[in-house]
Image (spheres, rainbow, N blue to C red):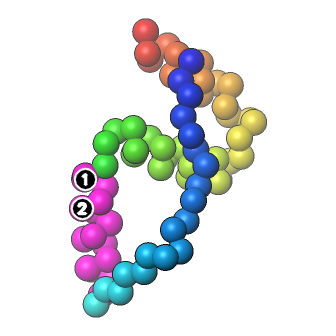
Amino acid sequence: MIEMDFSVHVDRTVLEVVDSFEEMNRRDREESWRATPAERFRWLEICRRANHGRAKYEEGFQRFLEVAER
C-alpha cells in the first residue's frame, strides 16, 4: 500500500511580486519542470480531493495504484 501525506500547508511568509502574467506563468512552468514525479502526483491528488472529495474515489484509485505497482 502506498502512503503519502496530502496535507496542504500554505507558507504565508513568502510573497513574490512579478511584472506580468507571462512572468508568473514562466515561473510556474519552471517549478513544474523541476518537480519530481512524486511531487507532481501529490499536486494532482490535492486538486482531485479539493474538487471531488476523499471517500468517493479513494478505494478505486488505490486499487489502480496497487495494480500499477505490480
In the rendered structure, the answer to whether residue 37 lies left or right of residue 42 reads left
Dot 1 falls on a residue whose secondary structure is helix
- Is 21 magenta? The answer is yes
Q: Position of residue 17 (x, y in %)?
A: 35, 86
Q: Is residue 69 left or right of residue 20?
A: right
Placement of 11 over or under 49, stated as above or below: below
C-beta proximity under 8 Å, tags 2 and 1: yes
Structural crowding at the residue carrying mark 2, measured as other residues with C-alpha within 10 Å and reported as few (<14), some (14–19) or many (≥20): few
Q: Which residue is mark 1?
A: 33
Q: CA distance from mark 2 to mark 1?
A: 5 Å
Of 55 and 13, which appears nearest the observer?
13
In the picture shown, does residue 40 fall above or below 21?
above
Q: Secondary structure at mark 2?
A: helix
Q: Estimate the x, y position of residue 51 in percent, counting from the top left.
A: 65, 53
Seen as rendered, the residue at the extreme bottom is: 19
Rendered-image quadrant of the N terminus: top right
Per the rendered image, the range of residues in magenta is 20-34
Position of residue 60 in the picture relative to residue 34 (left or right): right
The residue sitting at 39% across, 38% down in the picture is 38
Q: Which is the main secondary structure of the residues drawn in magenta?
A: helix
Rendering coords of residue 5 (x, y %): 56, 40
The residue depicted at 44 percent of the width and 41 percent of the height is 41
Which residue shows up at 68% across the image and 34% down it?
57
Q: Which kind of residue does numbered mark 2 sit on?
A: Glu
Seen from this angle, which residue lies furthest top?
A: 70
Q: Identify which amino acid the numbered label 1 is placed on.
A: Trp
Residue under label 2: 30
